[in-house]
Image (cartoon, rainbow, N blue to C red):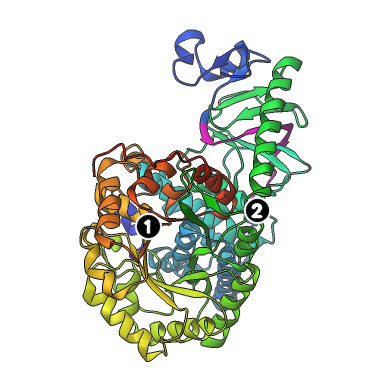
Amino acid sequence: MAGVGGVAEAAGAAGAEEVVGVAGAAERVGSLGEVAAAVPGKSVGGTPAAPGVGVGPKRELRRAAVVVPVEESRGAAVETARMQDALAAARREIGRQRGEIFRAHLALLDDDAILAEVWGRIAGGATAPEAWVAATGRVAGEFAALADPYLRERGADVRAVADQVARVLLGLPRGAVSGDGVVFAEELTPAEAAGLDAGRVAGVVQRAGSPTSHATIVLRGRGIPAVVGWPGPDVAEGTPVALDGSTGEVVVDPPPGVLRRFEERAAAARAEQRASVARAGAAAVTRGGVPVAVGANVGSVGDARVAAANGADLAGLVRTEFLFLGRDSAPDVDEQVSVYLSIAEALGGRRITLRTLDVGGDKPLPYVPMAAEANPFLGVRGIRHSLAHRELFAAQLRAIVEVARRTPVSVMFPMVTSVDELVAARRVLDEAGGVVPGLRVGIMIEVPAAALTAARFTPYVDFVSVGTNDLTQYTLAAERGNPALAGLAGARDPAVLRLIGAVCREIGTGVTVAVCGELAADGTAVPELLGLGVRELSVAPPRVPAVKDAVRRCPDPLPAPTAPV
């Protein structure tokens, strides 16, 4: 992949009597610090980041500072080995997480520009910690100085990965909190967000950060309320705090009446969640009697257990790349079979939809050489990558076929654009023994060209699944990870809805249309998706109960889409 250093160089008030928002506050009382001082005991508004209400004592996230000791190099060979061991340990740690964010972090560990500088500094007499901190600090600093918000966000990724590896090198623990409550931090890393105990953390308040930061995305996926960009004063450990992640409200040491109202809201939300979970095992059927399968997107055996506990009807998307990333060689057929069967077992034998390896371009595999690409999002990704690496692809399909002989399985090919790609993929599947009773074959529709010509695929598939995350970014020419385009890259854009409607019309009867992107988890969008003809939804495991409830609330008849299709 192209080095990030090179990229940087080239790019050159419900519940409170008074809410003071960030915007406009300085106009009335001066600086944000003065805002906090001017309204003691009142609410100081931050930026809403993850919905939900939380109440609890303030708990500061405490990190041991990363301080590189002054010491002599033990020699280039020893320091290189130290560095390689730390990188391998970080790969294993990051590889246990799931999602695009952590795949991007894995890629940073293999960044040519960063590693070349690290090896050069070690050869010049630096210790491994000195070389790593200096090289990553320089690259992160270059990103931080750029005007482009997306590239600045990449700088945050570099800092997060740099911190993680430095802590391994120096034997330092990750950030931690003591006890239950509302966690305060300057800014969480994605790994810290993923490591929080959702059962003990009532919410998160970050003094920095943004609603589009990777740590915030992780918090949202885990159902932890969060506020970012909070300008309030220092808060003593253990002080009662109430927050609303939907409005940005944060009330420190709230008066009894305010505290009671927040607690009532939080209790109501918990009660509704418990009720949703209690009925989640039942089928989701609209008021008009239309059955809808609600599955879960999973990236590990642990995810599958959570999905089963939340009443998922199936695994609508298994991101198999979690098995292939963060290691030095591909898993063999036996390892794949074992893991896929474990996922099926965790789901109680429900159908699992195994998406074939979705890597390439922005998600490289260290053991599969790839040429650098100017635009990896339009490059050799998904099925293109698999067809270019037939041996790897065939091995995965042999594993999937073997699993299909023992449990209900669907195989799904990602980023299919043309019928020729699908036919080629099916040929490899047939060679792997793909004629197995009950094995269903489908594709992900993520490219507008595939959406507009969906009828051409129907002779070759049993189902299609619309990946609205990628479909949105390709339709709107708005990279989904770029916070500067957050207001543009919405899956409910009329153009995106038209494409989903086109898929449903083109695909006809006998072929199920599913949606597995973030839009499926938006309860307000569920009636519209069903009105278009979607009959299966797949979401993050914790969202299954709420989405099933959204289906049950759908009126009869199903509503026509608000945007013409």
- What is the number of callouts on the image? 2
The quarter of the displayed image where residue 558 is located: top left
Q: Name the residue under label 2.
A: 195
| First-in-chain label (1 vs 2) | 2
Does 232 sit left or right of 388 as displayed?
A: right
Q: Name the residue under label 1.
A: 467
Magenta includes 58? yes
Residue found at x 41% / y 50%? 154
The location of residue 262, given as percent across then percent down, is: 68, 25
Nearer to us of marks 1 and 2 is 1
Q: What stretch is highlighted in magenta?
A: 48-66
Q: Is residue 314 above or below residue 149?
A: below
Secondary structure of the residue carrying numbered label 2: helix
Q: Nearer the viewer, residue 178 or 500?
A: 500
The answer to whether residue 362 shows anywhere in this view is yes
Residue found at x 31% / y 54%? 471
Q: In this view, does 115 lie above or below 22?
A: below
Q: Which amino acid does label 1 sit on?
A: Gly
